[in-house]
Amino acid sequence: MTTNQSEKKEIVTEEGITIYSYGEKITKELNVFYNPVMKINRDISLLFIKAYFTTQNQKKIKFCDPMTASGIRELRFLKTIPEIFEKITMGDISGEAIENIKNNFENNKISLKNCELAQNDAVNTISKQFYDFIEIDPFGSPVPFLDIAIQRIKHNGILSATATDTAALCGTYPKRTLRKYGMRVQKLLCYEEIGLRNLIAHCQIQAAKYDKILIPQVTFSYEHFYKVFFKVQDSKSIATENIKDLRYIEYDKPLQKITLNKYENENTVIGKTYAGLLQNKDQLQEMINNLHLIEDKKKIEKLLHKLNDEGEEIGYFNLHKIEKENNISSNMKFVDIIKELQNKGFNASFPHCGKLCIKTNATSNDILDVLKLSVNTK
Ligand SMILES: C[S@@+](CC[C@H](N)C(=O)[O-])C[C@H]1O[C@@H](n2cnc3c(N)ncnc32)[C@H](O)[C@@H]1O
């Protein structure tokens, strides 16, 4: 990404697309919003769409991004994977954003021929028709847009939800979580993943009202945001089962032990939350195969491999906390700890989120035994 200052506007280039961006600081008060950190969010949507709709063998798709901002996402799609789209619907509540999108298309010599673009509230933009893919990329919580988006996605279509209110989802503000997401929450040591699971559970509960199921395909926590791609299907019976599969969590903090319960009890700290698989590994592999579509791919490549290599256990162990709890300081490298746990017959892997953590089906006492194999002596 490169930038040149020109009066108040900045010219920004991302993956060969040049757009105008306003202001220097990333705030939601910007007239037209562009966040370079979210390049990875756009990279992953592009790779997801290419992989999912190519393997589905379906005809061209109807795509909707009701909070388009600068249009950078759609410009990149139309430059790199134009063959996928029948129609792209864009919108934004800001009239200035709409003018900017038009200019950005013109400057990049990309036609708006198969696009719809109007200043509108996202709920109105979504409600007009049915789509194969809806991208919900708001400031903060996706909650106000979920209800209508779920209703307007076709069978086997995709809902992509980004949330930047991670603090509410992961337990920093339990009252806000109860209010916005209707769930009880506490901040656990594996809070990044738990927040992601809480977002999934909330979306699934919303979908069940409409006899729809949301099956997580690719989900992750990255810096300040969560993102989940759901496959949406119509099914009354499975929707009921999915809701029944949501679980309440009990947590033993010293042992970092998560217990899943079907029913709430006096020890419940979180719930109901999603306890199923976070990734569809076939889909991830297809996305990895398509990485050549991204020029500046270092970050997205690293993320996709992390997601693909991550184990399926719920949560992860913070090794520094285990050391602190047991008053030891280990010399072992993370890779060696993982190898040693695997040698003992456990699953062990790096979580995609959570620094200095390990995902495993071993207990914290099993991990402690490994840490003790090589300790610092003062
Ligand atoms: C996070 S930005 C979107 C970024 C964009 N998707 C991208 O990849 O660069 C959110 C955008 O939503 C717009 N917005 C906020 N509330 C809205 C609403 N209720 N309806 C439609 N647009 C809205 C803002 O003007 C802003 O441009």
Image (tube, helix red, strand yellow):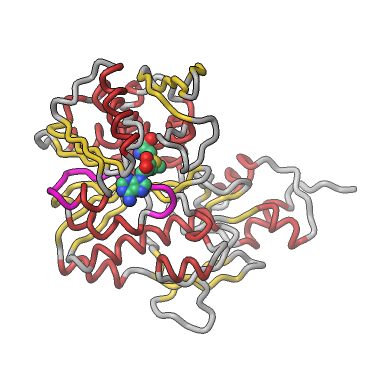
Q: Residue furthest left?
A: 59
Residue lying at 32% horizontally and 69% vertically, measured from the top left: 245
The residue range painted magenta reads 127-141
- How many numbered circles does the render carry? 0
Residue lying at 50% horizontally and 19% vertically, measured from the top left: 7
Indicate which quadrant contains ligand 1: top left
Against 321, is 40 above or below? above
In the foreground, 294 or 55: 294
Report x, y in % for residue 90.
24, 38
In the foreground, 49 or 254: 49
**Image-based side of 255 in relation to 16, left or right:** right
User: Which quadrant of the view contains residue 202?
Assistant: bottom left
Q: Residue furthest right?
A: 378
Residue 164 can be seen in this image: yes
Residue lying at 29% horizontally and 34% vertically, measured from the top left: 98
Report x, y in % for residue 3.
49, 19
User: Which quadrant of the view contains residue 293?
Assistant: top left
**Image-based side of 252 in relation to 239, left or right:** right
In the foreground, 75 or 51: 75
Residue 280 can be seen in this image: no
Report x, y in % for residue 225.
47, 46
User: Magenta stretch: residue 282 in it?
Assistant: no
User: Magenta stretch: residue 135 in it?
Assistant: yes
In the foreground, 330 or 195: 195
Report x, y in % for residue 135.
29, 44
Against 152, is 118 above or below? above
Residue lying at 51% horizontally and 18% vertically, measured from the top left: 5
